[in-house]
Each structure stands twice: as structure tokens, then as C-alpha cells.
Image: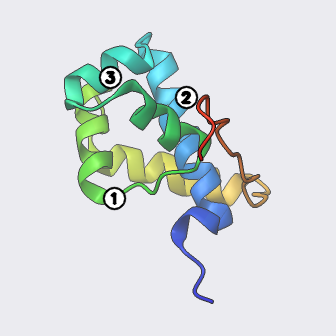
Amino acid sequence: MKVTSVHRPEHTALVGLLRELRLKTGLTQGVVAEKLGIAQTGISDVEIGVRGVDYLLVRDLCQIYGLSVADFDALLKKRLLNEKIEPALRIKRKDSKKRL
């Protein structure tokens, strides 16, 4: 079975950095989602690691957070070098509606 990027330890560092940058700017998930034209749950799914992150999303988030992609890449590389990165825990959303 092929391992997808959301199951790689580096993904944990990536989404953790994105969350920290959002918090540093003082923005809520809802505000960021509105700027991107997506649901708040989309940002939540990224930040908890259940949704993959592509380059275009990172680029857009960097713009919202006032950071260049090059600076983001440097921060991520620094984080990957300086931290012991554990694989992400698999988090499942509770479904509020029972499926038949």
C-alpha cells in the first residue's frame, strides 16, 4: 500500500507550522477559510492533519499570513532539522449523524 503524504512524519511539522503561523497572525480558522473561499472545517482538517496540503494552498496561506513561500520553506526546513518528528496521530471526526 502506498503511503500518502498525510502519513509522513514531515506532514505533522508542516501542518503544525501552518497552525502556528495562523495563531501568530491572530486569525481564526473561520477568517482564514473565508479568505480562501472554503469552509472552516477545511482549515481545521488541514491543521489536524486529516487533509493533504498542496503547494497552491501553502502559497495562499503564506500570502494571508504575510510570509513569502521562500520564508515559509526556510522555517519548515529549520523545524525539520531541529525537531524529532513523530508520525501524526490519526484523528477521526465524530460524525454527528448516524449513517444508515
Report how far apart the C-alphas of labels 1 and 2 lie in the structure: 18 Å
In the image shown, does 3 or 92 lie closer to the viewer? Answer: 92
| Figure check: 42 above or below 70 | above
Identified by mark 2, the residue type is Glu
Q: Nearer the viewer, mark 1 or mark 2?
A: 1
Q: Which mark is residue 54?
A: 1
Q: Which comes sooner in the sequence, label 1 or label 2?
A: 2
Report how far apart the C-alphas of labels 3 and 2 lie in the structure: 13 Å
Q: Looking at the rendering, which quadrant does residue 40 occupy?
A: top left
Name the element at disc 2. helix
Q: Position of residue 3 (x, y in %)?
A: 60, 80
Contact between labelled residues 2 and 3, with CB atoms less than 8 Å apart: no
Name the element at disc 3. helix
According to the image, label 2 marks what residue? 20
In the image shown, does 94 or 18 lie closer to the viewer? Answer: 94
Residue at the outermost front position: 100
Residue shown at the point (79%, 58%) measured from the top left: 86
According to the image, label 3 marks what residue? 32
Q: Position of residue 70 (x, y in %)?
A: 31, 51
Name the element at disc 1. loop
Identified by mark 1, the residue type is Asp
Q: Which comes sooner in the sequence, label 1 or label 3?
A: 3
Residue shown at the point (26%, 27%) measured from the top left: 64
Packing grade of label 3 (10 A; few <14, some 14-19, many >=20) is many
